[in-house]
Amino acid sequence: MTATQHEPAVMPFGLLAPPSAPDLPEAPAPDRTWRLIGGTAWVYLADPEGPGLTRPVIMSDGFGNGPSDLDVLHHALERGKFALLTALRRRGHDVVLLGYRERSASVLNNATTAIECIQRALVERPARHPLTVGGFGAGGLVTRYALARLEADGVDHRTATYFSYDSPHNGAWIPIGLQALAHALRATPALSRQVNSPAVRQLLWRHLETVDGTPRQDPLRTEFLEALRRVGDWPRLPRLLAVANGAGDGGGNGVRPGIDAVRATGGRFDGTTLRTQAKGDEQVVARLKGLPSGHTVRTCGFPELDGAPGGTLGTFGVAGDSLRATGAVGIEPAAASVCFVPTISAVAATGLDLGTDRDLYAAVDRLAPDAVAVDDFAYSSQNTGHAEITEELATWLLDRLP
């Protein structure tokens, strides 16, 4: 019997997307459904009796495993802290929810689906109505590239406004210790496949390919950034808006560096520890016990990323809950959720580096207009969950749509 056969499987958990609520209600039936190559678009009309799409807003789904789920997407946008879909339709906007056959596929591949959706919307709307196109999380990068690609190809996309909602323009962060754990849990290979999916490789500021690898900018991310540059980095025709779930005053989320976030104290993985990121060299971020590839994972030269201002994900908390199925596990409540999309990344700050504490904790509310790549941006008054729809941020966005 192999060591992997001795290893208990744990429930796969999402490292780059908020967990879905159990027993979600079924989404209302869309007024129209567009079958696209590589995905589906669900259309909700402000006036079902109208002549065509009116002031359409295309909203792209973000990262996840497998296909987009209308029930999940609709719930996130409508049944959280603010009913964004209802607010859009009350203001006379038709809503097009854009989903993908595989959300973890390459951003460039899913951009092809987004382009098809944009072209379909152009056909179905009266000529006088421009489009609004954007997305949440990775969806903001998919639509950013799609619009820029159309412009590079000489296609008039008739889009007046582009928006991104907590999208990692300068990169996202998943703790290296968690990435190592995903690779180490060989009895749950879905975790390693998730970390090594094309989209994750393209989105993460630093990626770990194997449990004993070295964190680096993945070659797929380098290729993606080069592909963006070839089409001009950004679309030039629409007004560019960016929304950040992170705070704008440079204040962190309270996660202390260099502490145990998750510690197994019994069962098969007794002694396994996941630690928050501390700055400096030879920082221990994970001790993996009871695994065929068990060892100590260290980083060198990283800033205090887990506590940085930005949209948060409960990655340590979700991982700890999954490990509890194998034995006693303690989770530090103050470190259950950590920074996922730093504020400086979500607002597309230029000249600021996720690799330094000084830039990572910069107060974006003091940035000059030419210090960001977008025309206007908003940030949260406090650090909130990644892509969480709050009244504060949603109202700011709604007030700027054509």
Image (spheres, helix red, strand yellow):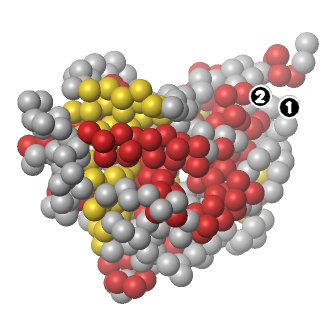
Query: Residue 257: x percent and y percent?
Result: 57, 63
Q: Residue at x 43, y 75 (%)?
A: 373
Kind of element beneath mark 2: loop
Query: How many numbered discs, if any?
Result: 2
Residue that badge 2 annotates: 186
Seen from the viewer's position, the closer of residues 214 and 299 is 214
Q: Nearer the viewer, mark 1 or mark 2?
A: 2
Is there a contact, CB below 8 Å, between mark 1 and mark 2?
yes
Q: Amino acid at mark 2?
A: Arg
Question: Disc 1 versus disc 2: distance between alpha carbons?
Answer: 8 Å
Is residue 333 among what the camera can see?
no
Seen from the viewer's position, the closer of residues 60 and 359 is 60
Query: Residue 46: x percent and y percent?
Result: 12, 38
Seen from the viewer's position, the closer of residues 167 and 181 is 167
Q: Quarter of the image containing the C terminus? A: bottom left
Compared with residue 22, is residue 213 higher up or lower down, i.e. above or below? below
Compared with residue 375, is residue 285 higher up or lower down, i.e. above or below? above
Question: In the drawing, does residue 265 fall left or right of residue 126?
Answer: right
Residue that badge 1 annotates: 292
Kind of element beneath mark 1: loop
Query: Residue 225: x percent and y percent?
Result: 62, 63
State the residue lying farthest toward the right: 1
Q: Residue at x 36, y 40 (%)?
A: 120
